[in-house]
Amino acid sequence: MTRFFLKHLLFLGLTLVVVSFLVFVLTELTPGDVARKYLGAYATQEQVDLLTRQMRLDRPVTVRYVEYVGKMLSGDLGDSTRFRVPVKDIIFDRLVNTALLAFVSFLLIVPLSIALGVAAGMREGSMLDRGIVLGSAILASIPEFALGVFLATIFVVTLGWLPGTAMLQAGGGWSIAAQMVLPVAVIVLFDTGYVVSMVRASMVEVMRRPYIRTAILKGMSFRQVVVGHALRNAMINPVTVILLQINYLVTGVVVVESVFAYPGFGRMMLEASLYKDIALIEAGALVAVFIAVITQILGDVGYMLLDPRIRT
Amino acid sequence: MSKMAFDNMSEVAPPSGEQALRAAIGGLDVRGIAPARFGASPMTLTGLGIVLFWIVVALLAPLIAPYPPNATDALAVAHPTPSAAHWLGTDHLGRDILSRVLWGARRVLTVAPVAVLAAAIAGTLLGLCAGYYRGVIDFVVSRIADILLSFPVIILYMIVLAMFGSSALNIILVIAVTKAPIIGRIVRGLTLELRERDYVAAAKMRGETPLHIMLVEILPNARGPLIVDMCLRMGYTTITIGVLGFLGIGLPPPDPDWGGMVKDTYGLMSVWPHMSVIPCAAISSMVVGFNLLAIGLREDTGP
Amino acid sequence: MSEAPNPDTVLQLDSVRLSYDLRAGEANVVRGLDLTLRRGEALGLVGESGSGKSTIAYALVRYLGPHGRIAGGRILFEGRDIAAMSEAELRQIRGRRIAMVYQEPISSLNPVMTVGRQLTEVPRVHEALSVAAARGRAEAMLADVNFADPAAIMARYPHQLSGGQQQRIVIAMALISKPALLIMDEPTTGLDVTVEAAVLELVRQLVRRHNTALLFISHNLATVAGLCDRIAVLYGGEIVEEGPIRQVFANPRHPYTHGLLDSLPRLARNKHDMPLRSIEGHAPSLLARPKGCGFAPRCRHAETPRCTAAEVASTAVPGESEHRVRCVKAVELAPWRPLATAGAHDRAPHARVTLLSTEALAKQYVPAGGVFGRRGATVHALGGIDLVVNRGQTLAIVGESGCGKSTFARVVSGLDTASAGRVMLDGDEIAMLPVERRSAGIKRKLQMVFQNPESTLNPSHTVGHTIARAVRCLKGLSPRAARREAERLLEMVQLLPEILARKPAQLSGGQKQRVAIARALAGDPDVVVADEPVSSLDVSVQAAIINLLSELQAERDESLIFISHDLAMVRYLADHVAVMYLGRLAEFGPVDALFTPPYHPYTEALLSAVPQPDPDQRRARIILEGSLPSTSVTPKGCPFASRCPRKVGAVCEETPPPMQHGPGGHRIACHIPLPDLLRLQAAGPPTGTVFPPLAGSA
C-alpha cells in the first residue's frame, strides 16, 4: 500500500516539476518578450531593455526557474497583470466558482450516466439500448458551445425562462440558481453522453462473461443477476473514468464559462493567455496539473478498491 | 507416401459464418451470436453518409458556394435573416452564411485529418515500440505520455496558441502532440497483447527484425480498434478546432471557421439567433457523423 | 419414440430439433434427437466440435440466446415441457432441479465475489434459507468436495485457488441444492490429468450418493468410458449410436464410432504396433445438411443411394436391445477390431547420433508485479535437466501444468534463455543464445510448432505469404523460388495448393496446424520442437496430425521434441520419454522402458490417471492428495515428496533423490532402489489413495 502511494506521490511531484518548468520556459521564452509582455506592444525597445535589466530577466532560464520555485513555495505567486490583483486571490476565487459548477454537475452526471449506462448495457441490442446509444452519441458530439447556443436559443431567446449569462451577481433579476441552470445543463448533457458510453461498454462486456451465464443458470432473476453479479464488475473501469471527469469539470469547462460569462477558472486562464499574463498562466497551469494528477490517483485507488484481484 | 497420404485433401473449409456458430456451439457463451441483418448496421451507414456529405461539400465548396465567403453584402446587414438571396441569411457583417458554412467545412476537413494522421503516426510508432520492447523504453515513453495526458488540453492550447500564435501548422502540431499519447496508449495495449501470440514467436524464430515484427506482424492485427479510434479522434478533433475557433485562438480571421463564426455572432443571439445556430448545427452534424461511424464500425467488427 | 411416463425418468427428449438464426439462414444444429435419462443414471454424450453437444446442454435449461430456439419436438424434464414453461418456472428449475458445471471454472466464477457468497446464493435464492443456514450448508458441501478447511475457503476469491479447486467449487455450487439432473459440459478439459482423475472420482461418488442423474458431455471417449453407464455418440446433431457402455465399446456398430476408436492412441501400444487412423473429410456444414445419413460423405462404407436417399432411422443392434445404431448397413459391417500393425514404420535401429543435448539446464525468473510494482518471488522453472535427442528420433516431454515443459521448449528454441547449464545443438552451444542472436544456420536447424492453432498463424497474412516468408528468411531464396518452395511444402503436409491464397480464418484447426508444420519445415530443420501441437484439436483430427508428424519424421530423418500432457499420445509417438515434475526430471528413458515398471512414483500416478476408452479397465487409479507446491521454493529434497504415495520417510524431504540408472539409458530420480521399486509396484498400487475403476456396477 505505502509503496503504491509513494510511487504516485513521486509521480505527482515529478509531473509538477516538469510541467512547471515547461510552462515557465514557454512563457518566459525570451527575456525581451517577457518585458514586452509586461509593457505592451507599444513600448520602445529601450524601455523593454531597461525593464529586462531591472527585472533581472537576462539571467539564464534555469536560475530564474529556481528562483520562481522558491518564491512559489513560500506562497508568493506574483501578481496578475490582467486582473491587477495578486495571483493568489484571483485563482482562489475563480477556483471556488468553478468548483461550485463542477460539484453540481458532478452530482447530476454520476447517477444519470450510471443509470443510463447500466440500463443500456444490461440488455444489449434492446430498443432501450439502441436509443441510449444513439442519444449519448449525439449528445457527446455536440460541442459545448453549440449546446450552449442551442439551449440558450430555446430557453433564453424564445422562451425567456432563463438568463443568458451567469455572472454570479445577484443583480439583474435572476437568482444565482437560475443563472447556473444553463451552464450546468450544458455540462451535464455533454459529459453524460460520454460517460454513458463508457459505462455501457463496460456493462456489455461484463454481461457477456461466463459467470453471468453461471448466475442465470443458478436460477437467479435478471434483476438479481444484474445487481448482484454484474454491477460490481461493470463498475471497475467506469469508476476511473468518472473520477477523471472531475479533472474535466474543473479545468476543461472553459468553453461553457465563456458562453455564459461565468467567472470561473477556465475563463481566467483564457484571459490570462490572451493577455499574456505570465504569473497567472504559470500558477494556473500548476493548479490544473495538480488537480489532474490527484484525480488520476483517486481513479487508481477506486479501481483497486473494487477489484480484489489487484488487492490480494 | 503412404496410402493415407492425401486423406485430408478433400477438406473444404466451412463458410465463415459457420465458424462463429461452431465456436459458439463448442461451448462459448451462446448469447454471443449476433447476426447482422445487413452488411453494415444502419448506424455505420448513417455516419458514413454524413461524413461523405461533408467531404463532398468541402471538396466542392469553391464551386457550389453562391458567394465568396468573405464578401459582405451591405444591403443584407439590416435584414440578415434567410431570404431568397441568402438561403441561410447573413452574419452581422453581411457575409453569406451558407457560403461561409461550406467553406468552413473545407477548413475543418483540411486541418483535422492532418492533425489526426500526425497523431496517429506518432502515437502508433511510439505505442508499438513501448509495447514491443517494454522495459526502459516502455517506462520512459509511458511516463512522458502520462505527463502529456495529465495536462488539461484546453489549458495547453490556450497557453501555446496564445503565446505562439494560431496558425494552421501550430494548431495541427498542438493537437497532434495532445492526441498522440492517447493513440499511443491504445496501440501499446494492443501490442502488449499481440506480442504474446505464437505467430510473433514464429516470426522471431525465423529471424525477422523487430521493425518487421512490429509493422508487418503486429500492426495489421491492430487495425480494427485503431480505425475505430481514428474515427473517434476525427470527431473530437473537429470539436477541438471548433472550440479553438470559439475561444478566439483558432484559425485566424477572416476566413470562415465554424467556431469563429459562433464566437462572432453568439452575442447577437437574442436578436439574430440563426447566425450562431447554423454553424453550431453544421459542426454538430459533422461530429455526429464521425461518432456514429465509429460506433457502428466498432460493433460491426467487434466480437 | 415415447414411452409411458416413468416416474424414474428425469429427462426425456422426443424428436428434438434445435436451430439458430444466422445471417446466412437457419442452421439446424440438432435434428430429431431422442434421449432418455433415468434417476441415478450417468449418460455420456460424446461428440466433436460442431456436433451440437453444447447446444443440447443449453437447450435443456432453455438458454439458447435470442437467436436460438427449440424448433421442434419436446424436452420433458420430470414430465414437464421445458419449452412451455414460463420464465418464473424456469428460474425455479435452474440451479435447483437442474444444475450445470462448465468447462473453464475460472471464467464461471465471479471474480469479485467470495466463494462463500457464490455458494450460499443458491440455497438462499431457491430455498429462502437464512444466511447462517446457508453458510452451514455451503461449508458442509465444501467438505463433501474434499476441501480440508471449508471455513477458510469460504472467504477466498476464485483467483486465489487452483484450477482443480475452482472446478470443485463449481461442482459444490451445482450440487448444493441436490438437483435431480446434473449437466457437465466438458468439465475436465484443460485440467491436468491427475486433477481430472480426482474430479471425476469426486463426481462419481457424489452422484451415486445423491442418486443424481448425470449428463456428461465430452469429446473424449476415454473419459466417458470410465464414468458413465450409458453412452450416446453425437455426429452432426444426431445420435448415431447409443447404448450401455459395455455394449457400445465391445461392439461398436457405427462407422463414426469406429473412426473415433481408431484415432485414439492407447497406453499399451505405440506407433510400431498399432497405427492411428483419422477420419477423412470434414464435419458437415450446418446450413446445408446432406440428405440421408449425415456421416455418409466421410464414411468408407457409404453407398449411394442406400445411405443418401432418405433419413436414416435408428435401429436396435441384434441381441442388444438397448444398443441402438443409426446406420443402414449396421448389421452388414464386420465387427470392429482394434487396428493391427501394418508395419507402416520399420524399426531399423538407428546409429545413435546425438543431435541435441542439454546438461544441467536451469531457468529461474522473477515475475513482474501488478499495480503495486511488487515483484513476485523467484520462480524456479527448470533445474538440472539432462536430456538427449538423437537424430531421427522423437523425445517426448510429459508433465502437468507447472512442470516446466513449456519453459524447456522456450529455452531450447531461444524464445527464452537459460539461467545456467548447456544446450548443445550439433556442436553449437545455444543455452544462453536468444533466438535473435542465433546464426542463420542454427535458426534453420531448429524450428518450432506451437500449441494453439488459433494464434499460430498471423490472421492478416495469407498462407502463401506466411510460408514463403519463412522460406525466404531461412533459405534466402528469391520471392519466386520461395513461392514454388511454399507449394512444395504445402503438398508435403497434404494440403491443396489453393490453400495458399486463403487466410487463417478460412481454415479449420487441423489445416492451420498443417500450415504451421509446413512453416516450421521451411528451412529443412534437423530438430522440430512441437509444444502440444494437437491438444486443441478434435480427436479425429489429432490422429491425422500425429500421423503426419510421424511420416515426415521418417521421411526426413529429423528429430522431434514432442511436448504433451497426453500420455497415450506420447506412448504412441515417442522413442524416448522424459517425465518432468516441478521443473525437475523425474524419469527418462526409452518409451518401452518408461511404460513398464519400475516407474517413478509420479509416473505411476500419471499412468493410472490416464482415461482409457475401455469400460473394463482394471487399472486402479491413484489419486494424488494436495496440490502442486509453490515453484518459488526450491525443495530441499525430492520435489514430489509432499504428494508422493510411496514416500519412504524423512529422507525424501531432506535429500535430493539420486538419479538411478536402469537398462537402456533408463533413469529414475528416486530414493527407493530400483529393484525395491519394481517389487513394490508389481505388488500393487500404494494403499490409501487408491480408488477402484470408475465404470462397472453400481
Image (cartoon, rainbow, N blue to C red):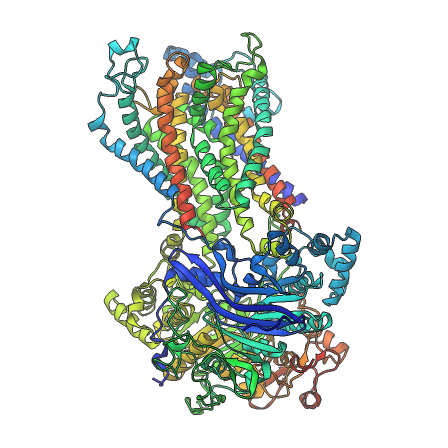
Q: Nearer the viewer, residue A178 or C503?
A: A178
Q: Nearer the viewer, residue A268 or A128?
A: A128
Say which residue appears at 46% left-offset and 23% top-offset.
Answer: A255
- Is A263 placed left or right of C504 in the picture? right
Q: Position of residue C112 (x, y in %)?
A: 64, 50
User: In this view, which residue lies farthest toward the left?
Assistant: B63
Q: Position of residue A285 (x, y in %)?
A: 51, 26
The answer to whether any part of residue C589 appears in the image is no
The answer to whether any part of residue A238 appears in the image is yes
Q: Nearer the viewer, residue C528 or A149?
A: A149
Q: Position of residue C68 (x, y in %)?
A: 48, 57
State which quadrant residue A245 falls in.
Answer: top right
State which quadrant residue B44 falls in.
Answer: top left
Say which residue appears at 45% left-offset and 37% top-offset.
Answer: A134
Is residue C258 placed above or below C376 in the rendered structure?
below
Q: Nearer the viewer, residue C335 or C146?
A: C335
- Quadrant of the image containing the N terminus of chain C: bottom right
Is residue C373 placed above or below C584 in the rendered structure?
above
- Is C606 placed left or right of C509 in the picture? right
Q: Position of residue A274 (x, y in %)?
A: 43, 19
- Quadrant of the image containing the C terminus of chain C: bottom right
User: In this view, which residue lies farthest toward the front?
Assistant: C4
Is residue C388 placed above or below B123 in the rendered structure?
below
Could you tell me how many numbered marks the image carries?
0
- Is C34 placed left or right of C604 in the picture? left
